[in-house]
Every structure is written in structure tokens, then in C-alpha cells.
Image: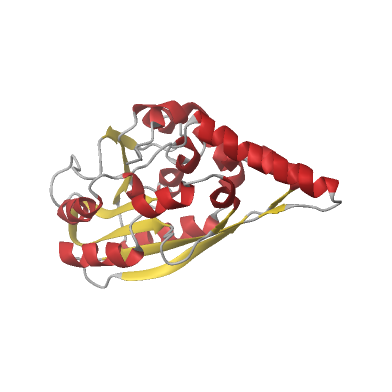
């Protein structure tokens, strides 16, 4: 079975490069800020906080923002944020906090990295106060194959995502089983970022150390995929055509109280 654990300590020094193009994602930030505002959340925990990109947004509405991540390298990057946040090394399957500590627990593009995904929902319920909420934001490759050229040119990436991403229906079932009520789901963001011809080679998300999908590939597998792209570009140009590399990903949020 393919190892689906990403070494984020190795990715940390270059990981923020992806946010140069990812910085204009107001809808995801708005969804989190709206939920926090509805709760009047003052103590917020992001599980899988990485470099602290979303915690910096949450700090504008909550007085105490905590970030948890298993990667020391990513937490080191998060410490460089100007917003004051409290950072702890740990995993979502065993949250190192007392019962009833937080008003809101959330994760963005992180649940698929957890070994105990259902356990995370149980742990979130434990550390939330009564009336608090949990939110999970990400994508579900099960319901539809997202339009992403990476899936087309890198063999096995889509199948690996199917194995590590839980379906939204499964996440909903886990939340309800953990005791959450009013569990809801809605799209929060549609990421559209098409590239054409050789411009795709400058895409930060094509670099091996900026996305977990490519980081999980061996160097040979990665090089083979890049060569497929270069060959396709050359063939299109020889025929006088412009080759399009589409990206259209749907981010959704599932949350419960």
C-alpha cells in the first residue's frame, strides 16, 4: 500500500510559495469568519494549521487563536506571522487540550492527513464548549472527479486522493455519531485557475514541494508526469495549437454545533 504520509518538515521552507497565487481566496476566509461571528467565538483552534495562513484571518475576530500541527517545520513558519497566535505540536486524533476549551474548532485542507479521521471529530466534540462548533473545509474527490490537470498527467494521484480523502457523507456521519447537531454542508469556494501552454510550468502547484499530491510521488514518478506535460505542450505547439491545463476545484464546508 502506498505511504500517504507527507513529510511537511521538508516542505515547510517552500510551502508558502503556493499562497502567492492562493492569497485571493476570500470566500474560504469569509465562511470561517462568518461562523466564528455567529458563535461569538473567542477561543478558536485550527487543527492542521500549517504555516498559519487561516489563523491570521481568524485573529481579526477572536481574542485567542490556537494552532495545532504535527510538523515542527510548519509551526516554525507559522511563528513568523505578525498576528499573535498560540502554537502547539500535536495531531488531530489526540488534541492536547482540556474538555470544553474552545468555541470553534476547524481544519482547512487537513483532515485527509489524519490517521484517525473519525477520532478527530470525537476529539473536537470533547474540547468544544456546549454550543460550540466544528468545521471541516476541503474537497471530496469521490462525488466528482475535480477538473485538475495534475490528475491527468501524474499517474496514480487521483486514486491516492480517493484513498485518503473521506467523502462528505462520511464526515457528516462521523459528526453526528460524535454528538454534533444541525450538521450542514455547503460549497464555499470554486477555485478556477487555468493555465495555457508553457505557462503551466511556472504554476506553484506544479512544484513537487507545494502540494501533498505531488509530494507523495517518488522523484521518478514526478519527473515522468512533468515530462508528459512538456511532451503534450511540444506536440500542441508543433500542430499550431494552444494547450489548456484546467484547474477547477470545489471547496466545501461541513459544520455542526
Task: Tell me: 6 left or right of 220.
Answer: left
Q: Position of residue 156 (x, y in %)?
A: 47, 47
- Vertical arrangement, residue 202 with respect to residue 59, above or below: above
For the image shown, how many numbered marks are present on the structure?
Answer: 0
Give the image's coloring scheme: secondary structure
In which quadrant of the rendered image does the N terminus lie? top left
Quadrant of the image occupied by residue 77: top left
Q: Position of residue 43 (x, y in %)?
A: 28, 49
Residue at 51% from the left image edge and 29% from the top image edge: 219
Quadrant of the image occupied by residue 131: bottom left
Residue at 33% from the left image edge and 71% from the top image edge: 184
- Vertical arrangement, residue 215 with respect to residue 41, above or below: above
Report the front residue among 236 and 73: 236
- Vertical arrangement, residue 177 with respect to residue 218, above or below: below
Task: Tell me: 32 left or right of 179.
Answer: right
Task: Tell me: 46 left or right of 154.
Answer: left
Q: Residue furthest left?
A: 99
Q: Residue furthest bottom?
A: 182
Q: Position of residue 108 (x, y in %)?
A: 40, 51
Q: Position of residue 91 (x, y in %)?
A: 25, 40
Residue at 44% from the left image edge and 59% from the top image edge: 141
Report the front residue among 58 and 212: 212
- Vertical arrangement, residue 73 with respect to residue 49, above or below: above
Residue at 40% from the left image edge and 32% from the top image edge: 8
- Is residue 209 in view? no
- Is residue 160 in view? yes
In which quadrant of the rendered image does the C terminus lie? bottom left
Quadrant of the image occupied by residue 253: bottom left
Amino acid at each position: 500500500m502506498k505511504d500517504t504520509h507527507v513529510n511537511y518538515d521538508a516542505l515547510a521552507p517552500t510551502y508558502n510559495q503556493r499562497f502567492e497565487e492562493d492569497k485571493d481566496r476570500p470566500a474560504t476566509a469569509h465562511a470561517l469568519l462568518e461562523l466564528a461571528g455567529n458563535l461569538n467565538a473567542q477561543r478558536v483552534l485550527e487543527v492542521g494549521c500549517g504555516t498559519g495562513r487561516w489563523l491570521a484571518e481568524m485573529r481579526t475576530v477572536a481574542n485567542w487563536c490556537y494552532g495545532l500541527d504535527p510538523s515542527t517545520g510548519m509551526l516554525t513558519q507559522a511563528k513568523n506571522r505578525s498576528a499573535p497566535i498560540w502554537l502547539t505540536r500535536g495531531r488531530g486524533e489526540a488534541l492536547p487540550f482540556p474538555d470544553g476549551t474552545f468555541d470553534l474548532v476547524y481544519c482547512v485542507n487537513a483532515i485527509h492527513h489524519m490517521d484517525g479521521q473519525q477520532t478527530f471529530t470525537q476529539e473536537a466534540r470533547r474540547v468544544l464548549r456546549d454550543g460550540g462548533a466544528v468545521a471541516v473545509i476541503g474537497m471530496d474527490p469521490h462525488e466528482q472527479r475535480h477538473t485538475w490537470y495534475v490528475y491527468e498527467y501524474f499517474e496514480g494521484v487521483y486514486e491516492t486522493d480517493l484513498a485518503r480523502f473521506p467523502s462528505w457523507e462520511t464526515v457528516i456521519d462521523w459528526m453526528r455519531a460524535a454528538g454534533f447537531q444541525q450538521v450542514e454542508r455547503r460549497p464555499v469556494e470554486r477555485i478556477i485557475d487555468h493555465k495555457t501552454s508553457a505557462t503551466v510550468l511556472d504554476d506553484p502547484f506544479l512544484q513537487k514541494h507545494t502540494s501533498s499530491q505531488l509530494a507523495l510521488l517518488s522523484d521518478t514518478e514526478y519527473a515522468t508526469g512533468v515530462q508528459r506535460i512538456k511532451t503534450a505542450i511540444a506536440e500542441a505547439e508543433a500542430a499550431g495549437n494552444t494547450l489548456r491545463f484546467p484547474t477547477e476545484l470545489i471547496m466545501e464546508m461541513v459544520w455542526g454545533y
